Image (cartoon, rainbow, N blue to C red):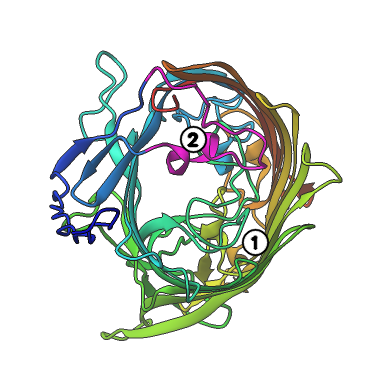
């Protein structure tokens, strides 16, 4: 090689890389020397930390293979006071506030409860950039067993709130859900995907009258266009509630209609069997409930409309015959919802409405879905329900709210051979006993209206978790269908109730 010549470059051998497979289990807990940033956000109209568990905004705690695991939940302590004794836990049975005939009417109720303590787990995997798989389980202690009591151990049992898995194909805008989740009839704050429901930020576990909701097993398919326009179809587990002006259980005989000597025998439910509650009745369900919803998200708020289809079945034995036949009736309704900012992100207006026949199951007051006509056929009860709420945020750590709600039922009756009305909404019942203690009162609910106000304060926050306190007051008024006093004078029974909640919640995972 001559002087000054450059030595030829020698190609280096390619580096050999060895990919270490992901460990089966890997701890991903937070490092406490990192800057703290709270995951609780009270600036929305339906904060997940209050209405659910806000587990989506938490970092994964650990990883199993390619599956990340997030843990969420809170410890709840509630002090509940009601002006009437409902002997009820932290979920108020709004339709159960008694009339003046009941000794419980003027007997107040005071109760401590930790039953709303809630835990959740969110598992997530991303097989490709466009595909996301999630599984979500949420439970509290709102159940009770045969030996449950509040004398010594308060042994209330865990219950399933939600348990579902989802498949999302982002490029197609496709969303699939299977399992138990909030019904598609529930109002949403954004889109129609789970954990985005527009639930009121109230402390009572039975929401407020007028809100449309259930939590049911379902199969849901949704499509979005640019995360702005949404269309969803849900097939949901059915169940029907039944009421009648006379005492009537499944297998009972209806009062004869005008011009007939005897009425038909009707069957509409059975006691629970294997893995169902043997102490409650389950209706005959010929088909699932079907919900079709469309929604749009704009800079001026979220808006949605939906249709609900239902079917009700009864088994009828006509008078004097020794055989039965089935009868199926159609019900359902239409609904709408909205979430609108009022000129600022510190104030939002929310609202929902549902009107139809046989839709009582979808309201917290559980006005009945159906009654019976003179032939024993199911007769869906007309109903309208709705609510309006104003949610404010004077500071990031404070949320204030006011909600008004109403549910109202129409009449479904027939004229009996005794000259009296029978069914739901009879207006010729002797209701004089509703006005005095120990009187007999068979009043049927026509309307429930309520006003709720309250707020939350997120007052402790750090690497040790977060603490929030809530205070809520609700006034409810119940109106019955009119009757008489047996002497030709009209009787219009009404009653009222007050509830006060003082609630504290500790969020150990919100660090």
Rendered image quadrant of residue 139: top left
Q: Does 156 sit left or right of 414 as displayed?
A: left
Q: Does the magenta stretch include residue 70?
A: no
- Asked whether the viewer can see residue 427, the reply is no
Residue lying at 58% horizontally and 40% vertically, measured from the top left: 94
- Residue 460 drawn at (x, y percent): 54, 14
Residue under pointer 2: 91
Q: Which residue is drawn at 71% across and 46% down?
A: 405
User: What percent of the width, then of the height, locates residue 496?
Assistant: 69, 33
Q: Which of marks 1 and 2 is nearer the N terminus?
A: 2
Q: Is residue 33 located in the magenta-colored stretch of the structure?
A: yes
Near-viewer residue (429 or 62): 62
Q: Is residue 346 visible?
A: yes
Along the line of sight, which residue is nearer the eye, 345 or 429?
345
Q: Position of residue 155 (x, y in %)?
A: 25, 24
- Reading the image, the residue beneath label 1 is 426
Q: Where is residue 391 in the image (x, y as percent from the top left)?
A: 73, 38
């Amino acid at each position: 090689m001559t002087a000054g010549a450059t030595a030829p470059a020698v190609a280096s051998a390619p580096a050999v890389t060895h990919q270490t497979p992901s460990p089966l289990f890997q701890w991903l807990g937070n490092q406490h020397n990192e800057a703290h940033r709270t995951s609780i956000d009270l600036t929305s109209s339906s904060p997940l930390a209050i209405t659910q568990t806000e587990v989506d905004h938490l970092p994964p705690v650990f990883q199993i293979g390619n599956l990340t695991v997030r843990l969420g939940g809170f410890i709840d302590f509630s002090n509940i006071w009601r002006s009437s004794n409902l002997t009820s836990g932290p979920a108020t049975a709004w339709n159960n506030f008694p009339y003046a005939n009941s000794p419980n009417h003027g007997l107040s109720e005071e109760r401590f409860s930790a039953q709303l303590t809630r835990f959740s787990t969110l598992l997530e995997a991303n097989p490709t950039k466009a595909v996301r798989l999630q599984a979500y389980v949420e439970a509290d202690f709102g159940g009770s067993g045969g030996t449950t009591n509040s004398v010594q151990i308060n042994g209330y049992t865990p219950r399933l709130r939600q348990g579902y898995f989802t498949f999302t194909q982002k490029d197609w805008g496709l969303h699939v859900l299977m399992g138990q989740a909030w019904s598609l009839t529930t109002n949403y704050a954004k889109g129609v995907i789970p954990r985005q429901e527009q639930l009121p930020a109230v402390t009572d576990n039975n929401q407020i009258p007028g809100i449309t909701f259930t939590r049911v097993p379902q199969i849901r398919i949704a499509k979005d266009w640019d995360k702005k326009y949404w269309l969803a179809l849900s097939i949901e587990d059915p169940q029907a509630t039944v009421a009648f002006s006379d005492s009537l259980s499944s297998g009972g005989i209806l009062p004869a209609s005008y011009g007939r000597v005897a009425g038909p025998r009707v069957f509409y439910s059975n006691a629970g069997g294997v893995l169902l509650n043997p102490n409650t009745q389950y209706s005959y369900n010929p088909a699932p409930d079907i919900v079709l919803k469309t929604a749009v998200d704009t800079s001026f708020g979220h808006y949605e409309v939906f249709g609900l289809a239902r079917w009700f079945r009864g088994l009828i034995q006509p008078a004097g015959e020794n055989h039965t036949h089935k009868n199926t009736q159609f019900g359902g309704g239409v609904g709408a919802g909205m979430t609108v900012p009022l000129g600022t992100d510190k104030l939002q207006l929310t609202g929902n409405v549902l009107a139809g026949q046989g839709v009582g199951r979808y309201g917290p007051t559980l006005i009945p879905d159906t009654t019976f006509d003179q032939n024993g056929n199911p007769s869906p009860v007309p109903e309208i329900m709705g609510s309006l709420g104003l949610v404010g945020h004077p500071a990031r750590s404070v949320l204030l709210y006011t909600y008004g709600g109403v549910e109202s039922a129409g009449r479904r009756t027939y004229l009996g051979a005794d000259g009296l009305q029978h069914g739901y909404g009879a207006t010729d019942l002797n209701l004089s006993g509703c006005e005095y203690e120990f009187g007999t009162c068979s009043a049927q609910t026509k309307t429930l209206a309520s006003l709720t106000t309250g707020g939350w304060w997120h007052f402790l926050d750090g690497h040790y978790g977060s603490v929030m306190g809530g205070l809520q007051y609700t006034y409810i008024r119940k109106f019955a269908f009119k009757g008489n006093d047996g002497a030709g004078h009209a009787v219009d029974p009404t009653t009222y109730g007050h509830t006060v909640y003082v609630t504290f919640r500790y969020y150990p995972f919100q660090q």
